Amino acid sequence: MMAATLVSPETVTVVDHWPEPVCGPDEVIVAVRGVGVCGSDLAVVSGRRAVPALPWVLGHEAFGVIQVVGPDVVDRRVGQRVVVEPNYPCLACGACRSGDTSGCRRRRAAGISEPGLLAERVAVPARFTWPVPDGLDDADAVCVEPFTVALNAVRMTGLRPGDPCLIVGAGSQGLLVVLAVLHAGGVPFVIEPQPGRRAFALQLGGADAGAAPDRRYPAVIETSGVPEAFEQALERAGDGGRLVVVGQSTRPARVSTFTLVQRRLTVRGCLIYDHPGGFRHTLATLAGHDLRPGRVLRERFDLAQASVAFAKAPDIAGKTWITLPRIEEPLS
């Protein structure tokens, strides 16, 4: 079958001979229809984030149709349209038992610690597949995972209706945070140096924070992962404010403890979401509200064009995704 693989840093190749997945007793095989391109995928492609082996199947933001159901699976069926929750905590350690599954030290991550989902067919633990609500189109389905991150980040700020929220960075994750802030009843303001991304964020309902450069905010979300942007985010947090950090970098950022103490700031890292509440909440939210997170998608590529998709994604104002041919028939 076809799969998009990383063969060396910056070199992505689509192969047509990748081994077919084997369905375990508590797994399902999903015929993948679409996969979003994320900043962590780009870090893998660039070599900034090491993976266990090469060649390596990329991607983790996936949805598709179940083709095979393992013998121990009772709540999934062939033909069911699902999104994949690509982070698999162990569910047995202390962190997992407390509900803090994002802190699981044994958590497996598709595309990072184990092969990714950008292939025609993948085997996935059944409990980490989620039926797609009726009416949710493909564009919205491919955004479920990153939108879950966005909703979690907004929740962590303690944002109240009517509160302004500063979003630093309007890449694909920042754009989804704009939508999440609007859904929470907040007022999103955006800092983004790239004109196309800034314009897109304003089109979605954000306001340009550059119009009031001295304003400070009770809630700030940093999504870019650039240390200088984190420094700016910290400076723009108001008295008693909360700064939630989504973007990651191994390069240090400067932090003024004077600012932290004098303004009584809270800084929290937002690492994905917790299972099962994160995806459950997102899918219920999308089923009950006309949010259409797929609006952030700007460029679509076929699987055969995956290398082009990964090369162009950093410069696209909006989110990139890759679609695969539809295969409806069950596997024999």
Image (tube, rainbow, N blue to C red):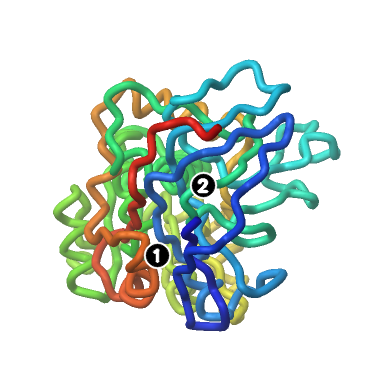
Give the CA distance from mark 2 to mark 1.
45 Å
Q: Secondary structure at mark 2?
A: strand
Front residue of 89/237: it is 89
Q: Secondary structure at mark 1?
A: helix
Q: Position of residue 55 (x, y in %)?
A: 61, 73
Give the residue at mark 2.
121
Give the residue at mark 1.
236
Looking at the image, residue 179 sits to the left or right of residue 263; the answer is: left
Considering the image in quadrants, where does the C terminus appear? top right
Q: Position of residue 242 (x, y in %)?
A: 50, 51
Residue 5 bears which disc, if any?
none
Classify 108 as above or below 251.
above
Residue, x 52% and y 69% (percent of image)? 5
Residue, x 48% and y 64% (percent of image)? 16
Front residue of 164/102: it is 102
Front residue of 35/43: it is 35
Q: Position of residue 190 (x, y in %)?
A: 28, 60
Count residues near mark 2 (Cα–Cα under 10 Å), then give few for <14, some for 14-19, many for 20+.
many
Classify 177 as above or below 278.
below
Classify 34 as above or below 7.
above
